[in-house]
Amino acid sequence: MSSREEILGRLQLAAKEQKRQANNAMIQPVLPEFNKEYLGDKVKKFMELIDILHGQAMEVSSLKEVKQYIDKKYPGQRVFINIEDAEYNNPEEWQNSDPHDLEDIEFALFHGTLAVAENGAIWFTEEQMGQRVAPYICQQMGVLIKKETILHTMAEAYEILKDPTLGFGGFIAGPSKTADIEQSLVTGAHGPRGLVVFIL
């Protein structure tokens, strides 16, 4: 065998191996069934986590209760509501505003897709945000979550969110906070100073 043939043979073997590895990489691993028993009541656990994360969670029976809370807590202040119920929304302001014009929002209410009991995280899509900047620029943030969309674990959440066509979205857990400086926890450092979750 000539050196030329030897080199070409090695290249062919390397190409086959590379192709084999690429095919193996496309095979998704089978995840084990994660233990959910330690969480107990997922709604109760989720509410506990929100409290630990310096937020507030409350169960409500109707949107009317949520509106009453907002009217009582933020009278005469700039409030934005972007939820599935059109009766309470002011979507024209969300959609038409320059993001810089949202800087004086005192309270913003959003509808979350799902919530996770083990860490208090809530998933939002871009449509639910109204504008990408909205959940991060408001002073106080409210989230409406349907009780049946609360999941035990992040593994369950990722099973639902693995569709690559879902587009932009993000998990938010509690109000903004940091402990980088002198190991002192500061709430509201980079975003909302407070979070209230309404569980419907």
Image (cartoon, rainbow, N blue to C red):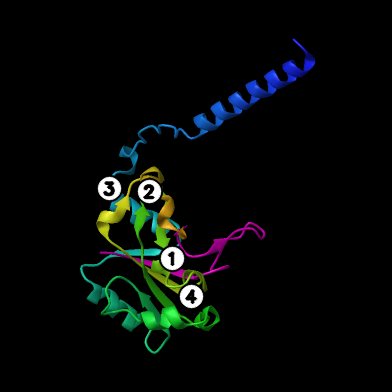
Residue tagged by mark 2? 157
Tell me the number on the disc at residue 126: 1
Q: Earlier in the sequence, mark 4 or mark 2?
A: 4
User: Badge 2: few (under 14), some or many (20 or more) residues near its Cα, within 10 Å?
Assistant: some
Mark sitting earlier along the chain (4/3): 3
Q: Marks 3 and 2, how far apart in space?
A: 17 Å
- Which mark is nearer the camera, 3 or 1? 1
Which of 186 and 88 lies nearest the eye of the viewer? 88
Please check the rendered image and state whether residue 198 is part of the magenta-colored stretch, yes or no.
Answer: yes
Real-space CA distance between mark 1 and mark 4, rounded to the nearest whole angstrom:
16 Å
Q: How many residues crowd around disc 3 within 10 Å: few (fewer than 14), some, or many (20 or more)?
A: few
| Residue 125 found in image quarter | bottom left
Q: Are marks 4 and 2 in contact (CB under 8 Å)?
A: no
- Label 4 – label 3 distance at C-alpha: 31 Å
First in residue order: circle 3 vs circle 2: 3
Percent x, y for residue 67? 28, 78
Q: Amino acid at mark 4?
A: Cys
